[in-house]
């Protein structure tokens, strides 16, 4: 098996070995390496510190760092699993994994539930989403209600799949470089 030698660890806090990240996600090693190139571009767009700030996240989504968006803020908060106000590379790859076409449906349902559970109570209340999802009419939507609602409305999960993540190296050919890692090695 080839080795991935890099100075990325020093330049990018939270950088993790692409082989390890690949084993924990639906991404191949080459795709993780391509995501690293994308991550480097985003994380250096405002402050070149090897981390993605909320401002850089907004800039990547909207090409405007001043445009506030509740949905984008909520996604940023879910990507920022360590709740430090920044996203490191490992968190970036693991969070993007839920949008991969090969990610399990259950992970997509769980992520979308957390996305709409704005206050983190484990329930989606009336102010957070649709009344029809509250199947037992108790004034809140728990994960079971949400699962049933999504099963009846599968289009809700369309945003949870980004087809181009199936082969990001093809989508972003400028990020492709010669990997030192042998994908077939175990």
Image (cartoon, helix red, strand yellow):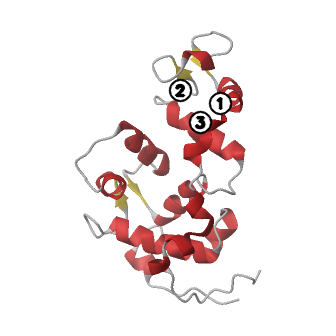
Q: Which label's residue is closer to the chain start, 2 or 3?
A: 2
Dot 3 alpha-carbon crowd within 10 angstroms: few under 14, some 14 to 19, many 20 or more: few
Q: Give the residue displayed 37% in from the left and 64% down from the top.
A: 51
Read off the residue under disc 3: 156
Kindly check if marks 1 and 2 are in contact, taking CB atoms under 8 A apart as contact: no
Read off the residue under disc 1: 153
> Exactly how many numbered labels are in the figure?
3
Q: Give the residue displayed 35% in from the left and 66% down from the top.
A: 43
Q: Where does the image place residue 70, in percent across and percent down from the top left?
A: 36, 37
How far is mark 2 from mark 3, CA to CA? 21 Å
Kindly check if marks 1 and 3 are in contact, taking CB atoms under 8 A apart as contact: yes
Q: In the picture provided, is 88 more to the left or to the right than 101?
A: left
Asked whether 84 or 18 is in front, the reply is: 18
Asked whether 100 or 121 is in front, the reply is: 100
Numbered tag placed on residue 61 in the rendering: none
- Between label 1 and label 2, give the one nearer the viewer: 1
Quadrant the N terminus occupies: bottom right
Q: Give the residue displayed 65% in from the left and 62% down from the top.
A: 25
Asked whether 170 or 46 is in front, the reply is: 170
Q: Is residue 104 above or below residue 4?
A: above
């Amino acid at each position: 098996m080839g080795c991935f030698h890099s100075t990325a660890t020093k330049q990018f806090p939270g950088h993790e070995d692409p082989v390890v990240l690949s084993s924990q996600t639906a991404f191949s090693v080459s795709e993780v390496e391509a995501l690293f190139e994308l991550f480097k571009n985003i994380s250096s767009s405002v402050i070149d510190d090897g981390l993605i700030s909320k401002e850089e996240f907004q800039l990547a989504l909207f090409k405007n760092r001043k445009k506030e968006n509740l949905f984008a803020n909520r996604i940023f908060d879910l990507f920022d699993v360590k709740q430090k106000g920044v996203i490191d590379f490992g968190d970036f790859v693991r969070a993007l994994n839920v949008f991969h076409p090969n990610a399990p449906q259950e992970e997509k349902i769980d992520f979308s539930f957390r996305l709409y559970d704005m206050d983190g109570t484990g329930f989606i209340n009336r102010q957070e989403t649709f009344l029809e999802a509250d199947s037992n009419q108790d004034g809140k939507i728990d994960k079971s209600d949400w699962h049933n609602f999504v099963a009846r409305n599968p289009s809700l999960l369309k945003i949870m799949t980004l087809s181009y993540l199936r082969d990001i190296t093809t989508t972003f050919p400028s990020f492709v470089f010669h990997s030192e890692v042998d994908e077939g090695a175990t």
